[in-house]
Amino acid sequence: MIKRLSASLAAAVLLTGCSAYSSQNSASSTAAQAEPVRAGAVSSADPRATAAGEAILAKGGSATDAAIAVMLALTVVEPQSSGIGGGGFLVRADGAGGDLLTYDGRETAPAAATGTRFLDENGERLPRELRVLSGLSVGVPGNLALAAKAHAAHGKLPWADLFQPAITLAEDGFRMNVRLNESLSGRNKGRAGLTAEARAVFFGADGEPLPVGSMVRNGELAESLTDLAETGAEALYDRNAEDLAEYIAEKTPQDGKMTTADITSYQSKLRDPVCAPYREYQVCGMGPPSSGGVAVAQMLGQLERFDIAALGPESPTFWHLFLESQRVAYADRELYIGDSDFVSVPVKGLVDPAYVASRSALISPSATITDLKPGTPPGAPLARADGDEPLEQGTTHFSVVDGAGNAVSYTSTVEGAFGSGLFFGGFYLNNELTDFSSTPVVDGKPVANAVEGGKRPRSSMAPTIVLDQNGEIVLVIGAAGGPTIPVQVARSIIGVVDFGLSAQDALALPLIMSFGETAVIEQGTMLEDMQDELTALGHSQIRAFGPPLKANALRRTADGWEVATDPRIAPKLVYTR
């Protein structure tokens, strides 16, 4: 099977002009490829997954086909971040005219779940370990249903073909890289090695993670992928539904347990895209239950009245304005965004130009906003309270463009690193239900993101496609990193549009993020040198740390597609120290 995959990868090199990787070679050039790509392109968080997508394009597959192959390959080589045990959101733009469709593959709570799922008998939040490392946190996986729905509409190659690169990686093995090794260590070790089955794959006889460069084989996952390739997504949602439901239910100590019906009834859904203007472009993303599309649109819209280009990325004033735009957007996000099948979400009102302008008027280039509160957009529901959301590091993003110019922006997740730690069929199951607010009511008011049976938790994922005035796709982008995701995406769009940067340089811009009254700045960047200026502008609580960041993008250039990968992770993709 290695020979067959390698032949496909060689063809992919001829097609795209960018480097391809097999499971065996050293990732000595894993930094983002600067060469333009002329006949389709793939950007992902692992070169072996990128190669899987390239191989599908080389066989004549569509962007959707290639994106599915990338998702499946990442299930194998990046299990800490995403996979078929999780869910995701996919934004697709047609190369002829830019028409958009968005696919919701977000996980759902069991039908019997209640608003007190994560509370004890006294109404206090359960210990984190019990909330996360149990069936309480597991939602019905949605990635395979999303893939099947998107493939039925936009696929060109047979379904089974999309699985072959991932099956080869799982069956014949792949090299442990620094990033996976580090993820298996430290505070994630207990979660990654929660089950004997997972330890048998990723850990040695000494109980420690397999060393960098060692071969990792996952035969059980290869069998699961082969089953799915041969029989379709129903292998999970029908034939194996009872076994999966029983496994999750056994690990669920309280509240509603997963049932077979929860799994067999799961559906991926088409959602309305969220599109808003920025400068001469249209920025389009995912709507509820994702908050990403709204948050990105609001941040950019609030900043449009400022001459960002003149300020430049080395200006403390720019970073102050960007931080303020986050604070304003996230105040609305916490209050209004939830699963629109369960709560009224005023999406049109939240991105209405007049409303965005009124919120932008709160932002001053010389001071911070005091006593910031959510706004009241057109169509806003009454009597609602804010929720909460943890910082996570179990998400990945990939961008694909095919030879016809069709584009896919796909963000996939298992929530925290290695999800719930529960391992079924050779893959990790998500802990996505911890994205719900743990408290259903605050001060007598319902929380939009409270747990309900069959509901999808709010997400920060922000797969995004930017189009020009002619409807041409110019940027395909997304990120990982929990609530930092919309901020990373908006920052990178500003980098390309306002600062004239390449996508690679835009992804390399530092992160500044508002968490309540605290401004987090990325360690080791120019932002640390701006602390005094930011403090003078009113940001009195500044903390520098290294948050989990990971973005990917494709940018149209005069010569083809620029493939960009976050430089923060490139050094960790090597197989030897």
Image (tube, rainbow, N blue to C red):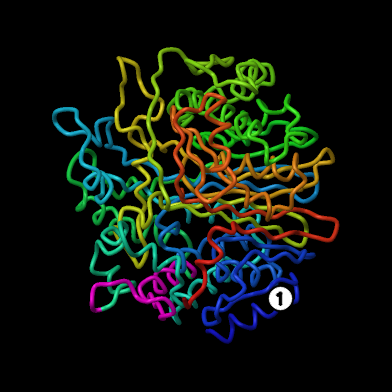
User: For numbered disc 1, what is the local secondary structure?
Assistant: helix
Q: Which residue is drawn at 63% across and 34% down?
A: 316
For the view shown, which residue lies furthest in the left direction?
Answer: 121
Q: Which of 113 and 354 is in front in this view?
A: 354
Q: Quadrant of residue 206?
A: bottom left
Q: Which residue is drawn at 34% across and 72% down?
A: 202
For the view shown, which residue lies furthest in the bottom direction?
Answer: 3
Q: Quadrant of residue 25?
A: bottom right
Q: Which residue is drawn at 28% across and 77% down?
A: 204
Q: In this view, does 162 lie to the left or right of 12?
A: left
Q: Does the magenta stretch include residue 322?
A: no
Q: Estimate the x, y position of residue 263 in percent, counting from the top left.
A: 36, 49
Residue indicated by mark 1: 13
Above or below for 463 versus 180: above
Q: Estimate the x, y position of residue 556 in percent, counting from the top left.
A: 78, 53
Q: Quadrant of residue 117?
A: top left
Q: How many marks?
A: 1
Magenta region, residue range: 205-229
Q: Which amino acid does label 1 sit on?
A: Val
